[in-house]
Amino acid sequence: MSDIVIRKRNEVYLELECEAHISMELSEYFTFEVPDAKFMPQYKKKYWDGKIRLFSPGNGQLYIGLLHYLIEWAEERDYTYSYQDNEYYGKVIERDPYILPETVKEYLDYLTEGTEIKPRDYQYNAVFKALKMYRKIIVSPTGSGKSFMIYSLVRYFTAANLKTLIIVPSISLVTQLYKDFENYGWNAEDYCHQVYAGEAKMSTAPVVITTWQSIYKLPKKYFDSYTAVIGDECHTFKAKSLTSIMTKLHEAKYRIGFTGTLDGTKTHRLVLEGLFGLSDRVTSTADLMKRDQLSQLKIKILALRHESYKFETYQDEMEYIVTHDKRNVFIKNLVGDLSGNTLVLFNYVEKHGEPLFDMINNSIGDTKKVFFVHGGVEASERENIRQLAEVNDNCVIIASYGTFSTGINIKNLHNIVFASPSKSRIRNLQSIGRVLRKGDNKAQAVLYDIADDFSKGSYNNYTLNHLKERIKIYNEEQFNYEIIPVNIKR
């Protein structure tokens, strides 16, 4: 008998049968410390040890997407394994033998026949791998045509009479993806149902596009009819509520995630790969800029030099920064001097967003269209603002990171200002993606990264360390940047 017997319980979990000592070894192997767990309330209150466990010795369950890692682990330790009642599922590398690169190319060419769309080589490759493997995370940056790849998969599933659930993180993306499908020449009204606040959740339509917030509390029965699930911006799926959706989809054998970037931690990647499948980076921002498919990016780091000061906590430093009058005036003047459309991103609505909007609107509201966007602004209004920016060159959008850092598509965007500091890899790269799309009269995009330096000697303040993390990202992504020191006093 094999050391490990592998059964497929459903399309979410494998069930492993093995000796107790092997089970404990597996548990240790699939246990990871969560970065920054010590700052989380559950950890501080000692309700949680700061670790995430992807294998349960109690019930022997492991996410199917981690099968590849299980096999690698077993072979490295000379443990034997076998598949019970499901030999075909054990073919980790080769899945659907009928899906071939040439057939996928013919299919995408057929979908775009008579249109101006010309599928790119990495799009052929991404759709091929997703269909062949059933499970895949496609890592592809903003401007790479993710919506077209999603559209290609949806058309395939619809033709095969498979019901598809598309999950997105925001209401804006529900309507935007629907309109993208229409722009590709599909009569989306006949096939797609949109779900967000106030809309009916039940539908017989073959394709349902929804925010995760609209469905995460629904019972498992709601999800039983779906054979395919697509997660757009799937890096958000590490949240407990989103994980609960994926684990209710017991019948969904096709699980495809799309994201511009993962956060760089092993824990994050393995949770997502467990829910969807192995990740595959199909192209990069630097490559797309070399191909002239994205605008050339220039980053100007405006390093504001303050009087040296040591803050007790990160929160104290942020409070000081966002209420700093001269800092906000500096941002107002910067935005007023910029040509073209500008997106200003902030963290705190009342403390920072509202004062910035008032200052900028009072200063340049007579010559430019100034908009304020946050979580309380309706999806229809956000879409109106996006459309206005596409046809005008004098718009300033003051927006919270949560509403405009991910997924919003504005080709006619020339400048982006980081008004609030962040060290999050995902947030920074997704935010940069807002300004990279090419427009008719746009060859270059500029990011103004506003940083704050309170350092003295060997001491670096919290947000200055965050700048160092952003610079690491810029170097990894091969972005061009310059650091411009600016003296600023209270």
Image (spheres, rainbow, N blue to C red):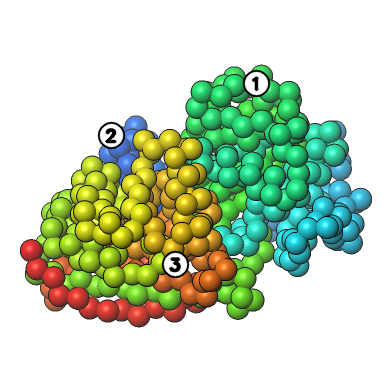
Q: Is residue 434 left or right of residue 121?
A: left
Q: CA distance from mark 2 to mark 1?
A: 40 Å
Q: Mark on residue 45?
A: 2
Q: Earlier in the sequence, mark 3 or mark 2?
A: 2
Q: Earlier in the sequence, mark 1 or mark 3?
A: 1
Determine whether the residue tagged by mark 1 lies in a helix, strand or loop: loop
Tell me where residue 331 sits by quadrant: bottom left
Q: CA distance from mark 3 to mark 2?
A: 46 Å
Residue 45 in picture, x, y percent from top left? 28, 34
Residue 150 visible to an observer of this rendering: no
The amino acid at mark 1 is Met
Position of residue 370 relative to residue 61, above or below, is below
- Which residue, given by chain and number where applicable, does mark 1 sit on? 202
The residue under the point 44% across, 48% down is: 385
The amino acid at mark 3 is His
Determine whether the residue tagged by mark 2 lies in a helix, strand or loop: loop
Q: Residues within 10 Å of mark 1 (few under 14, many from 20)?
A: few
- Which residue, given by chain and number where applicable, does mark 3 sit on? 414
Q: Quadrant of the C terminus?
A: bottom left
